[in-house]
Image (cartoon, grey):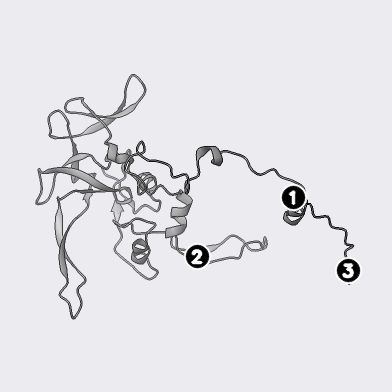
């Protein structure tokens, strides 16, 4: 029996890894808070009115297109997902399509949308759509790939038999966790493109820009020492300024 859950609220780990951005920033970029109590007042409880459920699409959660698709007042049909215990599909994997007009064809995964259990395969499962259409312009017809469910629409390709196969995760003698084909017991290595982010294609080829990037030596260096002084007192001490004025008396009634 399959158990389905409502559309996930959290951004997937692979999406965060691909963005190369802090998870807290991604959360701030897509969350929609309509009202909340002011901070700094302990008599007010921490309460807010915010959107709790988001409809994840092929647009990344930190983009403006994603926010536009989840604007306040937009109501769409609920989406239910089959829970995936351990994610096994990565960008660069060769998969075989099991459904639709391209059934039996194999292709390379170009995008992973973990929040919807989707993968997009290059050049396959395509459909035509019209963009830029208005009353004065007929629009342009473009071909784009539609997403496929990893739970039922695609399977990984065995590197030995070159056929679709189920896989399971195992550990090697060195303790490395790998994907293994159930058909041939052959290890299916993770593709190099799975490391790709919006900043670089491969981590090994990334070169630090000394003018813009903060090196690890500087990032780990402690440059602040706490003192029992205000910010102004600290500046005065560093600049050799001495305060010799007597403050005027003040009275409270």
Q: Nearer the viewer, mark 2 or mark 3?
A: 3
Instruction: Return the residue at label 1.
Output: 238
Q: Is residue 141 left or right of residue 10?
A: left
Image quarter of residue 32: bottom left
At 59% across and 39% down in the image, what residue appears? 221
Q: Would you say the residues marked 1 and 3 are in contact, meaning their CB atoms lie under 8 Å apart?
A: no
Instruction: Return the residue at label 3.
Output: 250
Image quarter of residue 182: top left
Name the secondary structure under disc 3. Answer: loop
Give the residue furthest to the top.
Answer: 173
The number of discs equals 3
At 67% across and 63% down in the image, what residue appears? 43
The answer to which of marks 1 and 3 sits earlier in the sequence is 1
Q: Nearer the viewer, mark 2 or mark 1?
A: 1
Give residue 144's position: percent from left, percent from top. 18, 57
* Badge 2 density bin: few <14, some 14–19, many ≥20, Cα 10 Å: few
- Disc 2 to disc 3, C-alpha distance: 44 Å
Instruction: Return the residue at label 2.
Output: 49
């Amino acid at each position: 029996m399959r158990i389905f859950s409502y559309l996930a609220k959290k951004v997937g780990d692979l999406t965060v890894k691909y963005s190369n951005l802090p998870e807290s920033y991604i959360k701030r970029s897509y969350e929609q808070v309509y009202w909340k109590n002011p901070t700094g007042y302990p008599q007010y409880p921490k309460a807010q009115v915010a959107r709790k459920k988001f409809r994840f699409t092929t647009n990344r959660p930190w983009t403006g297109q994603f926010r536009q698709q989840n604007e306040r007042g937009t109501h769409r049909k609920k989406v239910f997902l089959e829970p995936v215990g351990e994610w096994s599909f990565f960008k660069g994997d060769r998969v075989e399509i099991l459904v639709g007009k391209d059934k039996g064809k194999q292709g390379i995964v170009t995008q992973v949308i973990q929040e919807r259990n989707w993968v997009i395969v290059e050049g396959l499962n395509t459909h035509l759509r019209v963009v830029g259409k208005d009353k004065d312009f007929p629009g342009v017809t473009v071909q784009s790939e539609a997403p496929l469910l990893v739970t039922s629409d695609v399977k990984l390709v065995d590197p030995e038999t070159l056929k679709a196969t189920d896989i399971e995760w195992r550990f090697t003698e060195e303790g490395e966790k790998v994907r293994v084909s159930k058909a041939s017991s052959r290890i299916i290595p993770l593709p190099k493109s799975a490391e790709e982010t919006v900043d670089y294609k491969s981590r090994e080829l990334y070169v630090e820009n000394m003018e813009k990037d903060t090196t690890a030596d500087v990032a780990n260096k402690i440059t602040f020492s706490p003192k029992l002084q205000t910010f102004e007192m600290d500046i005065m001490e560093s600049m050799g300024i001495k305060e010799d004025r007597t403050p005027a008396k003040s009275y409270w009634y």
